[in-house]
Image (cartoon, rainbow, N blue to C red):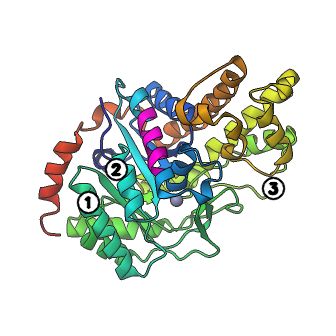
Amino acid sequence: MSLVPLRPLMEASMKYGYGQGGFNVNAVAQAKAVIEVHEMFRSPAILQGADLANGFMGGRTDFMNATLEDKKIGAKNIGNAVKKYGVDSEIPIVLHLDHGRDFDSCVAAIEGGYTSVMIDGSSLPFKENIELTREVVKYAHARGVSVEGELGVLAGVEDHVFSANSTYTNPLDAVEFFQKTGVDALAISYGTMHGASKGKNVKLRKEIAVAIRECLNHLGIFGALVSHGSSTVPQYIVDEINGLGGCLSDTYGISIEELQGAIGAGINKINVDTDIRLAVTRNMKELFAKYPEKRTSASIGGIYELLETKKTAFDPRVFLPPIMDTVMYGNIPDEDVAAIVDCVERGAKEVVGTLIVKFGSYGKAPLIETVTLDEMAERYKEIDKNL
Ligand SMILES: [Zn+2]
């Protein structure tokens, strides 16, 4: 099965009542591991490249300054990795752009092989957000690519996405947004937060999702709801990182129980990034603790240095620059690099596997309608005829 658009996965999530995780990947090894663990659980898969992660995968270790050209190269690298490991897969796989910041970023991702894009116009006034999102929908749907928008503001930090305060999504605006833009999915603000410091015992405003879902049903409008900033930040991993010399404080996620409640309230897609970062960071710290001789390795000693100097960090992109060739193309030149790749793969599998089970997407792969991008483009013509 080749890559599929997001839409059929969202249709199945609604029909069968389960949550579908969307997992961010920043390295070839991570893409491979995320696909493999979904295969193991017979779950459909959504692999996400964040706009700036594409810059990183394009070779920009200072990814905050990535240009459109860098992102184009990175989008291709992620696209190639996902195609390489996903082309003979038995499960449907979506390659989704997370937080596309403008029209051009979405085009770059689609050219790189993405089958779904997010356009994040949430910082714009409502009308401008609608206009921008509509433009992306027109371009993407014509190519069979699905689109996610965002309405309302989440607090927290995630690459370039930063906001000190949140504004909950107004359900009436959300319904109008679906109506006027034709987006397949919408990220809503209902109490989740980007980053690893979400505060203790977060309660989600699930009634916001319920209200939107009810109105869409009454009006006969299709619309998937997306929960961003939904990492669970497993406390046992945080404790292990600190036990290995890390300095993480004030790190709390959304509880699994809250997320399961949100799925029941009408959330279809749940984005997770931080959990994978934490598990990979712990594995690398554990590796150097267990095998001190690797600390001075010619190929990966630089990673140890970074882990030791940046004790409050838990983003593997901070630690992996010494092996960018491996990050970008999956090359494994020696045993030491292979050990780091193993840390990345096991970390991704541990947390993604847990969430596939908790969100309920295991076993659902055979239920997904297989649609090629060309077929989807035809379907969108009919779906969007009143836009
Ligand atoms: Zn987000």
The residue segment tinted magenta is 71-81
For label 1, the residue is 139
Q: Tag 1 or tag 2, which sits nearer the N-term?
A: 2
Which of discs 3 and 2 lies nearer the camera? The answer is 2
| Image coordinates for residue 183, horizontal then vertical, percent | 30, 62
Q: Nearer the viewer, residue 112 or 172?
A: 112
Taking the image as drawn, is residue 265 in sight? no
Taking the image as drawn, is residue 181 in sight? yes
| Image coordinates for residue 126, horizontal then vertical, percent | 39, 80
Residue count near mark 3 (Cα–Cα under 10 Å), binned few <14, some 14–19, many ≥20: few
Callout 1: SS? helix
Residue count near mark 2 (Cα–Cα under 10 Å), binned few <14, some 14–19, many ≥20: many
Q: Tag 1 or tag 3, which sits nearer the N-term?
A: 1
For label 2, the residue is 110
Callout 3: SS? loop
Left or right of 275? Residue 5 is left
Q: Is residue 191 above or below residue 253?
A: below
- Compute the Cα span from label 3 to label 1: 43 Å
Q: Tag 2 or tag 3, which sits nearer the N-term?
A: 2
For label 3, the residue is 249
Magenta span main SS: helix
Looking at the image, do the residues carrying marks 2 and 1 touch, with CB atoms under 8 Å apart? Answer: yes
